């Protein structure tokens, strides 16, 4: 089953409580928890919790690597198989919409790569700069441009390639996935009042700063491989990188993280509504994870 919801809604705590009672193991569905040493800014569960309840699909790649949804599905499928072979129920917990879709329904394959077209686009990126290609993408596919970082050269080139080859925006094609299911899935979504969620986002951001997010990002930038655009665009990391480059004060970076996290939550809520079979659980501001887990377990027991 899946436990999904917007960032900071409490999925992790509730998921662990459900796994604890059901004897289950957790498969993370988070595109940034896959990166090693990106711990504070991705709100990874601490080592002691991961020892108590096994977590999978965390710390799979170096921050300098590109990590694809296809690679995630491969790792998640292997994790689910291992969990089932151990006689435990797998519990997928996270809010990355593309990963939820890819794991439950499959991936949009798109047209095969066109070597000549890619050479042309790479040459333009070298000559004009990757942001120029991003601006072109915004003109033909604003939705794709909105979710792809202006420096994410590989994904920008792929989106432009798909448009040039098919005449259709990649964002439109990705919405035309079939509804076939790779697994027999039960979806439970956690939903909070917007004011409560924003308060949780703001407080979590402050705790991340206090816990040493700035130092974590500085250490990543000092590594030989650095941080690839995919990891560097993560909320919390992009803003802190700008701070360390002298572009923002720490106060400005903190406020921007809060704003961008709220924007991320809004996008997630929009994406999650595409699954009509989600059993939504409204979580009051003062409800402890144990009580929310009670209600989730009732849904599981009812099938």
Image: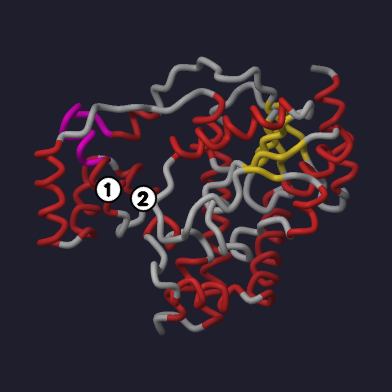
Disc 2 + disc 1, Cβ < 8 Å:
yes
Task: Name the residue nearer the viewer: 191 or 124.
Answer: 124
Q: x, y percentage for residue 92? A: 67, 35
Q: x, y percentage for residue 271? A: 52, 36
Q: Which of the 4 quarters of the picture holds residue 1?
A: top right
Q: In this view, does 267 lie above or below 169?
A: below
Tell whether 189 sits left or right of 242: right
Q: Which residue carries the number 1 mark? A: 156
The residue shown at (60%, 44%) is 57
In the rendered image, the quadrant that contains the C terminus is: top right
- Distance in Å between CA atoms under marks 2 and 1: 7 Å
Task: Name the residue nearer the viewer: 243 or 90.
Answer: 90
Q: Which of the 4 quarters of the picture holds residue 175?
A: top left
The number of numbered discs placed on residues in the rendered structure image is: 2
In the structure shown, which secondary structural element does the residue marked by tag 1 occupy? helix
The residue shown at (16%, 56%) is 125
Q: Which residue carries the number 2 mark? A: 148
Q: Is residue 107 magenta?
A: no
Tell me where the magenta segment starts and ends, as one range.
159-169
The residue shown at (22%, 46%) is 139
**Figure coloring:** secondary structure
Mark 2 is surrounded, within 10 Å at the Cα level, by few (under 14), some (14 to 19) or many (20 or more) other residues, namely: many
Q: Earlier in the sequence, mark 2 or mark 1?
A: 2
Q: x, y percentage for residue 115? A: 14, 38
The residue shown at (32%, 48%) is 145
In the structure shown, which secondary structural element does the residue marked by tag 2 occupy? loop
Prevailing SS of the magenta stretch: helix
């Amino acid at each position: 089953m899946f436990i999904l919801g917007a960032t900071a809604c409490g999925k992790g705590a509730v998921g662990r409580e459900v796994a604890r009672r059901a004897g289950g193991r957790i498969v993370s569905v988070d595109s940034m928890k896959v990166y090693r040493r990106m711990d504070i800014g991705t709100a990874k569960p601490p080592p002691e919790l991961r020892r108590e309840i096994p977590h999978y699909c965390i710390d799979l790649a170096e921050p300098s690597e590109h990590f694809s949804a296809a690679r995630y599905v491969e790792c998640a499928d292997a994790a689910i198989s291992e969990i089932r072979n151990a006689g435990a129920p797998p519990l997928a917990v996270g809010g990355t919409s593309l990963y939820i879709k890819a794991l439950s329904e499959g991936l949009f394959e798109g047209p095969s790569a066109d070597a000549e077209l890619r050479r042309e686009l790479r040459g333009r990126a070298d000559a004009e700069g990757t942001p120029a290609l991003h601006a072109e993408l915004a003109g033909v596919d604003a939705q794709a441009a909105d979710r792809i970082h202006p420096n994410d050269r590989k994904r920008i080139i792929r989106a432009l390639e798909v448009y040039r080859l098919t005449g259709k925006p990649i964002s439109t094609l990705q919405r035309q996935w079939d509804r076939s299911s790779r697994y027999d899935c039960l979806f439970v979504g956690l939903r909070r009042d917007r004011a409560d969620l924003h308060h949780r986002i703001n407080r979590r951001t402050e705790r991340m700063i206090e816990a040493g997010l700035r130092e974590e990002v500085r250490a990543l930038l000092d590594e030989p491989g650095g941080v690839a655009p995919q990891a560097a665009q993560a909320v919390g990391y992009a803003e802190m990188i700008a701070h360390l480059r002298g572009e923002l004060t720490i106060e400005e970076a903190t406020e921007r993280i809060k704003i961008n996290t709220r924007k991320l939550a809004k996008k997630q809520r929009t994406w999650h509504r595409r699954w009509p079979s989600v059993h939504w659980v409204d979580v009051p501001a003062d409800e402890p994870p144990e009580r929310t887990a009670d209600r989730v377990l009732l849904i599981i027991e009812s099938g």
